[in-house]
Image (cartoon, rainbow, N blue to C red):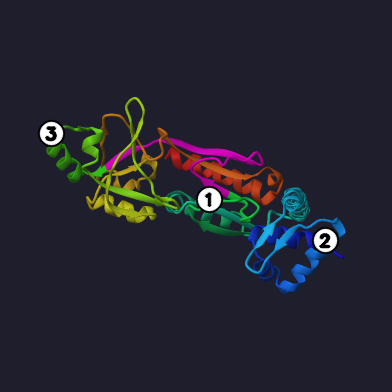
Amino acid sequence: MDKLKAINYFKRVVELQSFTAAANEFNVPASSISRRIKDLETQLGIELVERSTRNVKVSGLGRLYYQRITEVIDKLNSADALVSQNLSRPSGKLRISAPPGLAEVLLIPIFESFRKQYPEILLDLDFSDQLVMFGKDEVDIAIRGAPLKDERLIAKKLSSDPYQLWGAKNLVARLHSQFKTDTLTAKQLEECPALMFRTSNGFSPWFIKTTKWEKLSMRPTFICNSRTALMDALKNEEGLLISPKWLLPKELSTQIYAVNTQGVISASQQENMEVHLLYQQSKIQLPSIRVCVDFIQNEVVKYLKV
């Protein structure tokens, strides 16, 4: 029995919760996957998975075995890749996940420059707000608004900037006239049209803090996960938008005004919006990941200084 192959089959069956899905990934019959895992169980003298007609359930010992073999396989793959990449310039596929809004404004130009400088590296980009599971989702680098709580990951903070409330010049003037003030209260904000950013968990709520954070009951006029579409709506006076200043297109600087509020405004119950770059500790020695991490950090610093 090829034990390493059987272990890899078992690992992916656990992660995909399906013999068929694992078989499709390895391009072998599902019966081969099942037989290899059965041989592994016989050799170990334990049941790794409890088979049924509908799903795959991992046994208690199977779960412990999965956790240990995952660490070993990750290290083995990293060692293979390290040797391969050190024979030449950084190369191979690099899988990166990032939020679509951040990608539109900041990351796409950075990735274009990176591809020109490192043509041997194939970028596989996924612009999504979905929660990333390193190892299971086969992601090398993730860029997110908050670091994941996982001791196996390294998180590098790319930026930390205060949230602000923005509106088109004429809309802001109308709201000041309507409420007879240029500093809006929480109650007044709840009467304002709002542009909301959609995430994987629904649209991002608004919060305000005077002494403590309070969730605002807003009336969205537009919900979208496209930063470009939200900026068009902002420019067209369709509503107010919460965003750090640097995420606003520079060409809108004369059309968009900051809106003063009685309290700190936020989309996350944090005063600042943070952006973090995440990757696995076990992969930092890979040349492709190392050069990409350094490249992104340097380019973000340049962008924020402009």
* Label 2 sits on residue: 40
* Quarter containing the C terminus: top left
Tag count in the figure? 3
Give the farthest residue toward the top.
211
Residue 120 in view of the camera: no
Q: Check whether the beta carbons of the residues at disc 1 and disc 3 lie within 8 A of each other.
A: no
Going from N to C along the chain, the mark reached first, 2 or 1, is 2
Image quadrant assignment for residue 248: top left
Q: Is residue 267 magenta?
A: no
Q: Nearer the viewer, residue 239 or 31?
A: 31
Magenta segment = 142-166
> What is the spatial separation of the Cα atoms under label 2 and label 1, in whole angstroms?
32 Å
Q: Earlier in the sequence, mark 1 or mark 3?
A: 1
Which residue bears the numbered disc 1? Answer: 131
Task: Name above or below for residue 296 compared with residue 261.
Answer: below
In the drawing, does residue 117 fall left or right of residue 193?
A: right
Three-letter amino acid code at the position of disc 1:
Leu
Q: Position of residue 191 (x, y in %)?
A: 21, 42
Residue for badge 3: 180
